[in-house]
């Protein structure tokens, strides 16, 4: 079905038999709109017009449609959501540069996207999973739930269909690596065996602790590397955030489709950023140390005709998430298995 910009609206058809007949006719003929009398469950108002629709579930009970009269969210700075799905995002910047604020804006934008097709597969929605070692997402976010993780051996409830923040601030960096690796591996294996129409975006804060330079051959980085390189084929992408781009493995940065490079002044960071933005040394040293809060140098990484440009990003406004995990159809319980035995086995 052709995609149409709009926002998802939960509705209940009044004439159920007619609704079923209309939907079956539309599906047989490859149409993407129907004319029905329906009631918006959120407002109680009737909808009597041509509606662009995507069917989730039993038509006789409840369906979700997209009302094309409600516009899609927009951004006032460069961002390509298709490239973000295909290759992920890289965001860097020193303290108080606004990199986490930018990640929240992009996460909120991606979660509000309507259903879409990618490589001949249909995805109902986009969810976001954040690994937060600084509790900045726990304080304010559009993601409704968060869960504290205090021990690598502690079982947690990991939803495959609902967005969530994992508060890993109480764990040592080595345990954070293991935890992120196990979550990525568990989700990857689950989706490969049971393809579900949900696109997952993983946001890894302090990426220099998870994929440091020359670390991709290590055992704990294998799941992260697999998700970054081939995860898009299964509806999974990774976004990386870091204060120190020089400490992040170069391969993972190259794998990302879009880069937002914020405030930087350290010589190693500037040299690494210079290799990507392709500016001369004077311009690099003139630009990055002077970037203000919320300003980033945007680059389509790997683009043949791409050029770096300074962009201003907006301030994110959200709510404080609740400390629990929503239980949905595809929930499964994550358990530590195999890694420690492989790590310490003779």
Image (cartoon, helix red, strand yellow):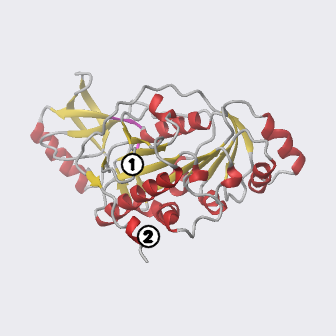
Residue 43 appears in the figure: yes
Q: Earlier in the sequence, mark 2 or mark 1?
A: 1
Label 2 secondary element: helix
Q: Is residue 38 above or below residue 130?
A: above
Q: Which residue is mark 2?
A: 344
- Local packing at callout 1 (Cα closer than 10 Å; few below 14, some 14-19, many 20+) is some
Q: Is residue 160 left or right of residue 271?
A: left
Q: Distance from label 2 to label 1 (Cα)?
A: 18 Å
Residue 301 rendering spot, x and y as whole percentages: 66, 55
Left or right of 102, for residue 223? left
- Locate the C terminus by quadrant: bottom left
Image-based side of 22 in relation to 102, left or right: left
Magenta stretch: residue 184 in it?
Answer: no
Q: Is residue 2 left or right of residue 136?
A: left
Pointer 1 residue: 151
Q: Which residues are magenta?
A: 3-8
Q: Position of residue 257 (x, y in %)?
A: 60, 54
Which quadrant holds residue 41? top left
| Residue ID at (50%, 47%) | 203
Task: Identify the residue at image location x=52%, y=57%.
Answer: 86
In front: 103, or 205?
205
Name the main secondary structure of what is drawn in magenta. Answer: loop
């Amino acid at each position: 079905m052709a995609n149409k910009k709009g926002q998802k609206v939960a509705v209940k058809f009044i004439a159920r038999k007619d609704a079923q007949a209309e939907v079956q006719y539309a599906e047989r003929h490859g149409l993407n709109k129907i004319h029905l009398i329906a009631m918006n469950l959120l407002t109680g108002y009737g909808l009597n017009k041509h509606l662009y629709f995507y069917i989730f579930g039993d038509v006789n009970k409840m369906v979700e449609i997209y009302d094309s009269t409600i516009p899609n969210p927009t951004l006032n700075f460069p961002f390509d959501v298709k490239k973000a799905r295909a290759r992920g995002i890289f965001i860097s910047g020193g303290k108080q540069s606004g990199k986490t604020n930018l990640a929240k804006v992009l996460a909120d934008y991606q979660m509000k996207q309507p259903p879409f097709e990618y490589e001949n597969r249909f995805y109902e929605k986009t969810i976001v999973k954040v690994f937060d070692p600084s509790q900045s997402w726990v304080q304010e976010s559009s993601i409704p739930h968060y869960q504290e993780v205090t021990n690598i051996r502690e079982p947690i409830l990991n939803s495959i269909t609902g967005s969530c923040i994992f508060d890993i601030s109480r764990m040592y960096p080595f345990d954070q690596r293991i935890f992120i690796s196990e979550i990525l591996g568990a989700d990857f294996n689950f989706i490969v065996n049971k393809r579900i129409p949900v696109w997952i975006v993983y946001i890894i804060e302090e990426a220099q602790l998870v994929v440091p330079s020359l670390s991709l051959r290590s055992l704990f980085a294998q799941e992260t590397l697999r998700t970054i390189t081939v995860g898009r084929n299964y509806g999974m992408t990774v976004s990386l955030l870091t204060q120190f781009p020089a400490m992040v493995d170069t391969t993972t940065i190259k794998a990302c489709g879009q880069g937002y490079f914020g405030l930087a002044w350290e010589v190693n960071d500037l040299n690494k950023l210079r290799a990507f933005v392709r500016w001369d040394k004077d311009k690099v040293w003139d630009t990055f140390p002077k970037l203000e809060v919320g300003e980033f140098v945007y680059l389509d990484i790997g683009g043949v005709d791409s050029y770096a440009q300074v962009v201003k990003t907006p301030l994110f406004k959200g709510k404080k998430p609740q400390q629990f995990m929503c239980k949905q159809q595809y929930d499964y319980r994550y358990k530590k298995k195999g890694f420690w035995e492989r790590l310490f086995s003779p």
